[in-house]
Amino acid sequence: MLMRCATGQEKQKKLLEANAGHFSMVKYALCSWFSPTPFRTKLTAAELRALHLADLITELNGFCGFMSILSSMRYCLGPPTSYGPIWFALAFMPFGLFFDFMDGKVARWRQKSSLMGQELDSLADLISFGVSPAVAAFALGLRTPIDTLLLSFFVLCGLTRLARFNVTVSSLPKDATGKSKYFEGTPIPSSLCIVGAMAWCVSQGYVIGGEQGIIGGVLGGQDSWWGGVHPIVGVFVCWGCAMVSRTIHIPKP
């Protein structure tokens, strides 16, 4: 029995030490749960000390994403031509990218990282570059049932993209510094290209209730039984497909 317990602890130790990507915290928690009490207590104490300065910067990324969502909601509550809140919504997302860039810089500068930070990074990216652009698009006029379904597809592609990266990062080819050589599929922060396009649409009045109306209009008519669909939402669909593509390899800078 003692030999079996020792063997089990050795396997758990190897599992924790392996570079298994961002899901390592899940394995960390499972190992601590199924291990003897002393081992579990030690891991829990280490987990409580795992938050570093870089992780706090990552949380600022998530903060920007959430503030963007609230600003988009505030725009929906006011007149369509009052663009102040939607400008704030669009501006918060590039600030999220800034913090997403800085957390890695700070982690390498201080030579400190944590399992908590690995999980926070993916969650913050999903909020700032997945949910926030979709909510902004909804606020700007993509509000039919089909529009919302396709925007949900975009968000789910971003979620899948991040989850796949988490479990495959250790198997991707590495350079001399240990970093992955490329992204498999377009990285989720690339959705800021869509955000830039939405900012241009706002400046030109191509929004719901604006002078020009939404680019491409609506197919089927919003009074139809299925609510119609705005063709411009296809940009989100294509972007979502690019994020989960296995054939697109984007070199890392």
Image (tube, helix red, strand yellow):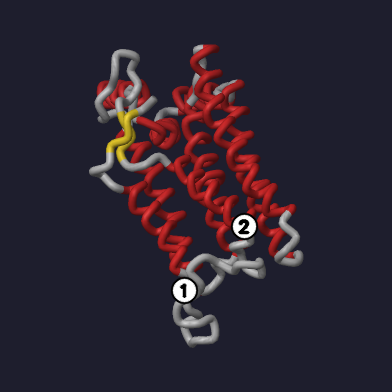
Vertically, is 96 above or below 253? Answer: below
Residue 106, given in percent of the width and then of the height, sits at 55, 18
Give the residue pinned by disc 2.
204
Viewer-proximal residue, 200 or 3? 200
Q: Quadrant of the C terminus?
A: top left
Residue 94, given in percent of the width and then of the height, sits at 58, 38
Residue 15, given in percent of the width and then of the height, sits at 32, 26
Residue neighbourhood size for the residue with mark 1, other residues' Cα within 10 Å, grouped as few (<14), some (14–19), many (≥20): many
User: Residue visible at 45% across and 82% down?
Assistant: 220
Q: Quadrant of the N terminus?
A: top left
Quarter of image, res 9: top left
Vertically, is 215 above or below 134? Answer: below
Looking at the rendered structure, the kind of residue marked 2 is Gln
Viewer-proximal residue, 21 or 229? 229
Q: Nearer the viewer, mark 2 or mark 1?
A: 2
Image-based side of 158 in relation to 41, left or right = left
Image-based side of 152 in relation to 251, left or right = right
Is residue 206 visible to us here?
A: yes
Q: Secondary structure at mark 2?
A: helix
Looking at the rendered structure, the kind of residue marked 1 is Val
User: Residue visible at 53% across and 12% down?
Assistant: 109
Is residue 9 visible to us here?
A: no
Give the residue pinned by disc 1.
229
Quarter of image, res 27: top left
